Amino acid sequence: MLTNILFSMHKMAEEAPMKTFSFEEVKEHNKAGGCWLVIHDNVYDVTKFLDEHPGGEEVLLEQAGGDATENFEDVGHSSDARTLMKDYLIGELKEEDKRDNLPTKLPNYDKDAKDKDNGSSCVLQ
Ligand code: HEM
């Protein structure tokens, strides 16, 4: 009985939807005291990882509160690094703020700027 309850709780935890954040919320965590990064539309809280990052804290802080996808991929991180990331995953971007889906695929694509000019400067090729 207890085993059954524990099992279903475990399953519920596994299937729980990821927490979602707007890019505005991510932007607020832009310092050593609270450092979030977006990588492939996932949100990572790397505050506690700053000291441990083999590439140093500086590179992470430069991207704090922003989209670090391109920089992360440019380094060619190992599969160990990709496994380690999961420890810092706190959620994903809200659907409307997801960037991997954007046609331009620009990592630091400024959605607000696009909103201001109705996207007329976004040229698809
Ligand atoms: C949660 C996010 C991240 C994790 C878990 C992580 C983890 C790691 C690990 C384990 C390494 C050692 C080499 C390897 O195994 O690939 C590493 C190296 C490095 N990382 Fe990251 N990293 C993260 C994000 C980033 C970001 C966003 C940048 C750039 C802005 C970055 C830049 C670097 C650099 C420059 C190195 C050194 C590469 C070298 O010495 O060859 N990392 N990282």
Image (cartoon, rainbow, N blue to C red):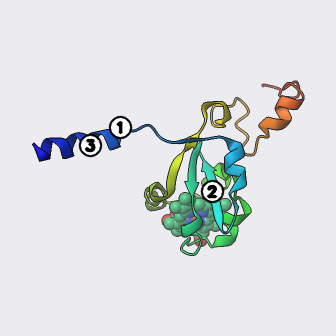
- Which residue lies under the disc numbered 3? 9
Question: Is the residue marked by circle 1 packed among few (<14), some (14-19), or many (20+) residues within 10 Å?
Answer: few
Looking at the rendered structure, the secondary structure element under dot 1 is helix
Q: Position of residue 60 (x, y in %)?
A: 66, 64
Q: Quadrant of ligand 1?
A: bottom right
| Labels 3 & 2 near each other (Cβ < 8 A) | no
Q: Quadrant of the C terminus?
A: top right
Looking at the rendered structure, the secondary structure element under dot 2 is strand
The label on residue 73 is none
* Observer-nearest of 54 and 24: 24
Q: Amino acid at mark 2?
A: Trp
Above or below, 101 against 87 in this view is: above
Residue 40's image quarter? top right
Q: Earlier in the sequence, mark 1 or mark 3?
A: 3
Q: Position of residue 104 (x, y in %)?
A: 74, 33
| Labels 1 & 2 near each other (Cβ < 8 A) | no
- Which residue lies under the disc numbered 1? 15
Q: Amino acid at mark 3?
A: Met
Question: Is the residue marked by circle 3 packed among few (<14), some (14-19), or many (20+) residues within 10 Å?
Answer: few
The label on residue 36 is 2
| Disc 3 from disc 2: Cα separation | 29 Å
Question: Is the residue marked by circle 2 packed among few (<14), some (14-19), or many (20+) residues within 10 Å?
Answer: many
* Observer-nearest of 33 and 117: 33
Q: Earlier in the sequence, mark 3 or mark 2?
A: 3
| Disc 1 from disc 3: Cα separation | 10 Å
Q: Earlier in the sequence, mark 1 or mark 2?
A: 1
Q: Amino acid at mark 1?
A: Glu
| Disc 1 from disc 2: Cα separation | 24 Å
Does the closest atom of ligand 1 sit within 8 Å of the Cβ of label 3?
no
Residue lying at 69% horizontally and 43% vertically, measured from the top left: 23
Q: Judge from the rendering whether residue 80 lies leftward or rightward of residue 44; answer left or right.
A: left
Above or below, 49 against 76 in this view is: below
